[in-house]
């Protein structure tokens, strides 16, 4: 079944879905990270949730999973071009959040 979106923002939010994917995108912006590095870079995320989010992001084409066949096994995650373009698009939102963090924290 094909999803119909009402606008571009609706489509973007469907790909990002929740707070963790944005934080994972942000963590991967500097380059590839191994699972443990990524988990440390995203405070508060559980191992299970990180695995699920990475699988969804890989399926949607935001993240690339590279398996290096060595002993011990090594897996790295990196942004695809699609993921980089989404990161570029949400960067101004992050800047807005930084500028208004005190006001936003006062709301919660």
Image (cartoon, rainbow, N blue to C red):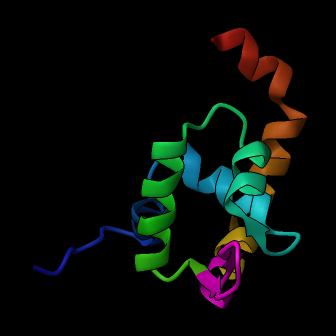
Instruction: Please tell me which residue is depicted at 46% across the width and 72% down the height of the picture.
Output: 8
Q: Image quadrant for the C terminus?
A: top right
Instruction: Please tell me which residue is depicted at 41% across the width and 70% down the height of the picture.
Output: 11
Residue 35 left/right relative to 102: left
In-front residue for pair 4/66: 66
Residue 13 left/right relative to 94: left
Res. 73 image quadrant = bottom right
Q: Which residues are magenta?
A: 65-83
Residue 10 left/right relative to 27: left
Q: Is residue 73 magenta?
A: yes
Residue 81 position (above or below residue 43): below
Res. 63 image quadrant = bottom right
In-front residue for pair 46/107: 46
Q: Image quadrant for the N terminus?
A: bottom left
Q: Is residue 106 magenta?
A: no
Instruction: Please tell me which residue is depicted at 46% across the width and 44% down the height of the picture.
Output: 48
Instruction: Please tell me which residue is depicted at 85% across the width and 19% down the height of the picture.
Output: 102
User: How far across and down, in percent of the image, does residue 90 sit?
Assistant: 70, 62
User: How far across and down, in percent of the image, does residue 3 sit?
Assistant: 20, 74
Q: How many marks?
A: 0
Name, please, the residue furthest toward the front: 71
């Amino acid at each position: 079944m094909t999803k119909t979106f009402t606008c571009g923002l609706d489509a973007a939010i469907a790909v990002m879905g929740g707070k963790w994917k944005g934080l994972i995108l942000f963590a991967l912006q500097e380059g590839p990270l191994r699972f443990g590095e990524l988990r440390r870079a995203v405070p508060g995320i559980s191992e299970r949730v990180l695995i699920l989010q990475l699988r969804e992001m890989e399926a949607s084409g935001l993240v690339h999973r590279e398996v290096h066949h060595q002993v011990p096994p090594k897996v790295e995650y990196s942004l695809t071009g699609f993921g980089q373009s989404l990161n570029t698009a949400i960067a101004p939102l992050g800047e807005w959040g930084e500028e208004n963090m005190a006001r936003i924290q006062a709301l919660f």
